[in-house]
Image (spheres, helix red, strand yellow):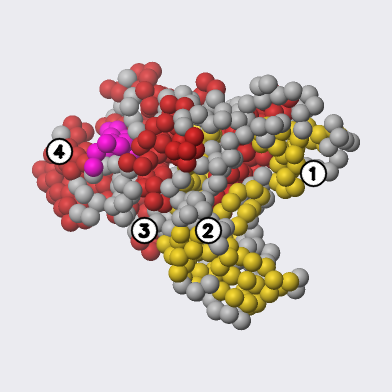
Amino acid sequence: MGLTNVQMYEVVEVGPERIIGEVIRIEGDRSVIQVYENTTGLRPGWPIYPTGGPLSLELGPGLIGQIFDGIQRPLDKIHRLKGVYIERGEKVDVFDAEVQWHFTPTVGNGEHVKGGQVLGIVPETDLVEHRVMVPPGLSGEIADIADEGNYTATDVIARIETAGGTAEVAMIQKWPVRKPRPYDERLRPDRPLMTGQRIIDTFFPLAKGGTAAIPGGFGTGKTMTQHSLAKWCDADIIVYIGCGERGNEMTDVLVEFPKLVDPRSGRSLMERTILVANTSNMPVAAREVSIYTGITLAEYYRDMGYDVAVMADSTSRWAEALRELSARLEEMPVEEGFPAHLPANLASFYERGGRVRTLCGKEGSISIVGSVSPMGGDFSEPVTQHTKRFIRCFWALDTDLANARHYPAINWLTSYSEYADEIAEWWRVHEPQWGGMRHEALEIMQKEDKLQQIVKLVGPDVLPDSQRLVLFIAELMKDAFLQQNAFDENDMYCAPEKQMGILRCILWLWHRGGAVIAGGAPLRAVRDLPCVQAILRAKTAIRDEDTEALKKLLATVDSELAQLEGGKR
């Protein structure tokens, strides 16, 4: 009662412990506040302190490698300073006041600058060059720029003369989490995000700046797949959001990520990664906002011209937080109790991805991969169905494949990608046959699915050898191409050249093998060729850079089939 000077989504502090909350409804002088922390013990009559602004992040050098909770409290620092538990109302500075960064200016006094323009660079890690930018909406003439040297994140490094006076700019800037950061132009997503996962890169590719969903039931490998994407994809920056996941899964991420080695640089993966940890035992209000925290961090580095990959695990837990908050507000529920604004909220999140030309003239992108955890693996539930409206890449995880230890358990019949046509030009430059081979391989897998319906009824023996060849090639495709070993040094990541080399060998066996069988040879003769075992071993036996070994394997396949064909003439 009595809160007449607050606005929607303004951050307030509640009670003597100054617990952080956010205004989510205003009715006259009565406001509804969602508190980001435990509310046990709050009493009527305790004071409320408005802060005058919405929930905003502090953005500057030093974010890379950090672990935040849903409202950007640095968990590592809290652990060092305060202990294991986060006390209510805990407030710790995101940036250390004593840490200095080496700043090198890229503009001079008297130059006209505008929002998003780079003022100077800071080596944030060995892998990331931090570009200190003019805050969006600010423009004018440089009155004073700091000389090259060491400064703290809060030191003023530039003074800009604007129409309204002189504005002081530090390395840190603040930005509201629910407001998308501006850019100059949206670009077509025509470059693939290479992940090293064969079924993704070849069958269902994701473009840089694209959006994808990984739906699957319990134990199908959503988190494992996102871990692999975070480690191996060719994005410059990784933002991993653990939204409402179980504590043990988030612990695995926090423990494993610092130990992972970036395959491109040989250094720790954390030198280009930011983690947002908001587990299921944390308040639902903080879970709801953690998604926006992660995407705002991603936009900040996108504006510098980097390609950023956001892993959101999982959007279902986020939707459940929306449902719980909606119920507390007594809003009218719709499907399965979810609020009517669930589709709008999902759209506002995924629409913040994309490939853009930034305000400073560079190209940057945000690729979003959100996992969905439908109850019982039911893809017809609301979160999965609404998510499909706003994403263009759908990697459906299959429980039967997961139980059969087929990794990644992505179902090749129910998954799809709408980026294949847009990135086809990139593939034509690097591998002209990619489109044709991809289409033919998918066609084989679809034929196999239809034949399996017959096999279930009458068995495989009644099929002619030409149809049994389809079943054989499809099994070879599953074992030699679609399935990967996340623990094998040569198979945990597969370069595009190796992907095409293996697929080319399988399809050549399909073409020549069909001709041999049409000439009178039995299927058994094709199946028993030594090259079949060589194809099965190729993914683990051949290194990515050994293109000669792949050429020799193709020549071996051709030679053995030619001998078999010649023996039948």
- Is the residue under label 2 in contact with that under label 4 (CB below 8 Å)? no
Residue 479 within the magenta-colored segment of the rendering: yes
User: Is residue 390 shown left or right of residue 151?
Assistant: right
| Magenta-drawn stretch, dominant element (helix, strand or loop) | helix
Q: Quadrant of the C terminus?
A: top left
The 10 Å Cα crowd at callout 1, few under 14, some 14 to 19, many 20 or more, is some
- Is the residue under label 1 in contact with that under label 3 (CB below 8 Å)? no
Work out how far the residue at label 2 is from the one at label 3, CA to CA, in angstroms.
18 Å
Work out how far the residue at label 2 is from the one at label 1, CA to CA, in angstroms.
30 Å
Work out how far the residue at label 4 is from the one at label 3, CA to CA, in angstroms.
50 Å
Residue assigned mark 4: 529
The kind of secondary structure element at disc 3 is loop
**Can you give x and y, in whole percent of width and height, for residue 365 in the image?**
52, 56
**Can you give x and y, in whole percent of width and height, for residue 85 in the image?**
50, 29
Residue assigned mark 2: 153
- Is the residue under label 3 in contact with that under label 2 (CB below 8 Å)? no
Work out how far the residue at label 1 is from the one at label 4, CA to CA, in angstroms.
74 Å
User: Is residue 347 shown left or right of residue 461?
Assistant: right
Q: At 67% across and 35% down in the image, what residue appears?
A: 18
User: Is residue 445 shown left or right of residue 210?
Assistant: left
Residue 545 vs 469, above or below: the answer is below
Mark 4 or 2, closer to the camera = 2
The residue type indicated by label 3 comes to Asp
Q: Is residue 316 visible?
A: no
Residue assigned mark 1: 7
The residue type indicated by label 1 comes to Gln
Q: Quadrant of the N terminus?
A: top right
Residue assigned mark 3: 126
